[in-house]
Amino acid sequence: MSRVHVSLKAAMIAVLVGFPLESASGETVFSKSISYFAIGGRTAAELDKALATAGPMMKSTGTRHPGATRIKFGGTITYVSRGGRCAVGSARVTLSTRIILPRWKYRNQANSDLALVWDTLASDIKRHEERHAEIARNHARQMEKAFLSLKPEADCERMQARVTEVSAREVESHDKDQARFDRTEAANFDRRMIRLLQHRLETLKKSDR
């Protein structure tokens, strides 16, 4: 079966200037949606081909994949005057994730062996993409904390430059963690699928007793 990949789309944090606020505050806002694309195929080979031709297109690779998570960071930052210097007054990081998963049209008509393989693969694809969303959420929280921990600068122009630096650094860190996760998943794919299939088979045997 095809490996599972992810597409990342990270936007820079929008910056607003506001006066006055007394203390720094933050509020991370998350939203998540799940959508599906239909695939056909009656055999394992046809399913594999369908995933490769009908899955979401990844701009980073120029190819289609069996699942994806679209990630977009955004938000606002306000500045306050504190002791004659410019400081971060509030930071509100927003994160939007859209998970795209396959749905097999002929699942209910499949024989037990192929249905088992599909159910195992589909479950693993969903777990994989949910983990990408979780990684993004962790980084959104980390990004917000990084903004709020910035020390005041002489003026808001310098403060804005620092915010831009932190934003770029945090997005880069996020992308690296996502890529690292994908590499680990790809390296363990075959062993993981065999283990998951064996576990499902054992569960089915126990339920039949």
Image (spheres, rainbow, N blue to C red):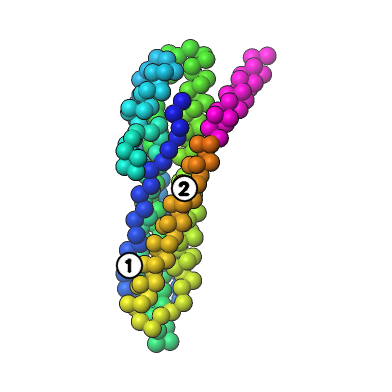
User: Residue 160: image x %, image y %?
Assistant: 35, 72
Point 51% across, 44% down: residue:
181
Q: Quadrant of residue 24?
A: bottom left
Q: How many marks?
A: 2
The magenta segment is 188-209
Residue 178 is tagged as 2
Q: Which residue is mark 1?
A: 15
Q: Give how far apart the Cα atoms at labels 1 and 2 are.
A: 25 Å
Note whether 159 is above or below 122 in the view shown: below
> Does the rendering let one see residue 92?
no
Q: Nearer the viewer, residue 10 or 75?
A: 10
Compare marks 1 and 2 and give the one earlier in the sequence: 1
Point 47% across, 47% down: residue:
178
Q: Residues within 10 Å of mark 2 (few under 14, many from 20)?
A: some
Whether residue 195 appears in magenta in the rendering, the answer is: yes
Whether pointer 1 and pointer 2 mark residues with C-beta atoms closer than 8 Å, the reply is no
Q: Is residue 11 left or right of residue 126?
A: left
Whether residue 6 appears in magenta in the rendering, the answer is: no
Point 64% across, 14% down: residue:
208
Residue 136 is tagged as none
Note whether 131 is above or below 3 in the view shown: below
Quarter of the picture holding the C terminus: top right
Q: Nearer the viewer, residue 53 or 84?
A: 53
User: Residue 153: image x %, image y %?
Assistant: 41, 80
Magenta residues: mostly which secondary structure? helix
Note whether 35 is above or below 49 in the view shown: below
- Secondary structure beneath dot 2 equals helix
Q: Is residue 17 left or right of residue 43?
A: left
Amino acid type assigned to the residue bearing label 2 in the image: Gln
User: Residue 21: image x %, image y %?
Assistant: 40, 77
